[in-house]
Image (cartoon, rainbow, N blue to C red):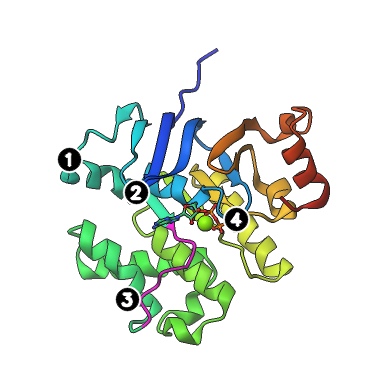
Amino acid sequence: MKQIKPIIEIRELEARYGDMIALKDINVDIYPEEITVILGGSGCGKTTLLKNILRLYEPYAGSVKFWGEDILSKDEAEFREVLKRTGMLFQNGALLNSISVYENISIPLEMHTNLPPSVIDKMIRVKLALVGLSEAIYKLPSELSGGMKKRAALARALALDPHLLFCDEPSAGLDPVTSASLDELIMNLKNQLKMTIVIVTHELASIHRIADKIIFLDSGRMLYSGKLDDVKHAGIPEIDRFFKVGKY
Ligand SMILES: Nc1ncnc2c1ncn2[C@@H]1O[C@H](COP(=O)(O)OP(=O)(O)OP(=O)(O)O)[C@@H](O)[C@H]1O
Ligand SMILES: [Mg+2]
């Protein structure tokens, strides 16, 4: 049987803010066409992990490989090529408020491709249709509901057809129905577009719907990394408590 290689390999990752150690001894493999959910209480380092993987902050120590290549030794231009294959949905949405949804999604396409305007126009429309937001194409972010903003930000993260997608709490603050439809969309990205997805969420229902693997962080340390199905037998009290009551 052919062995499946991880898309991302993280070894002994340490992240700091000044003297404060935010993450230590992080060892994770992310496999293709899987959804990996990062779990853990507020302030445990979930966003920090995503930002260090994407070099928005430079890791203090350790190694990170994407597709078998060490990304930390790449210069800016080389790493930009890696980022083109990677989409990121930030925790705070981060749409630009003064321009329309259409223009927000056009930014990565204009920055990173030389495609003619007519092709860019088509790509924007395809992405908005994918997230079910075609009717809001010319609206400003301030005219959208919370769920619509998340979907617009997701359309922007998908603009360049990434192989890898990182999402930081995409369903936070959404009602259960909207949250479930976002999960469905994320499952479709995996199943139909064969994307590999790393996602931070606290919603138990969501975790059960979408997660193949989980990474459980606690105060900057990794308590567990592996299959969702196995975690309940791992005998880790903090994790057992979370899956029993949905609180850290
Ligand atoms: N830019 C920063 N400068 C200094 N400290 C930071 C910075 N960002 C985060 N921290 C600290 O690092 C720790 C981890 O923060 P992080 O944002 O990664 O947590 P989180 O798990 O994403 O939490 P939440 O669930 O609330 O989003 C916290 O103690 C936080 O105060
Ligand atoms: Mg966070």
- Can you say whether 134 is above or below 229 in the image? below
Q: Residue at x 64, y 56 (%)?
A: 184
Q: Earlier in the sequence, mark 3 or mark 1?
A: 1
On whether residue 91 falls in the magenta region, the answer is: yes
Can you tell which of label 2 and label 4 is closer to the viewer? 2
Question: Quick one: label 2, few (<14), some, or many (20+) residues within 10 Å?
Answer: few
Ligand 1 lies under 8 Å from the Cβ of mark 4 = yes
What secondary structure do most residues of the magenta stretch adopt? loop
Q: Nearer the viewer, residue 229 or 112?
A: 229
Whether ligand 1 has any atom under 8 Å from the Cβ at mark 2 is answered as yes
In whole angstroms, how far apart are the C-alphas of marks 2 and 1? 23 Å
Please report the bounds of the magenta region as a residue range: 89-97
Q: Are marks 2 and 4 in contact (CB under 8 Å)?
A: no
Report which residue position mark 3 lands on: 103
Q: Secondary structure at mark 1?
A: loop
Question: In this figure, which residue is indicated by the disc labeled 2?
Answer: 18
Q: Amino acid at mark 4?
A: Ser
Camera-nearest label, 3 or 1 = 1
Q: Quadrant of the N terminus?
A: top right
Q: Which residue is mark 4?
A: 42
Distance in Å between CA atoms under marks 1 and 4: 33 Å
As measured in the structure, the alpha-carbon distance from the residue carrying label 2 to the one carrying label 3 is 36 Å
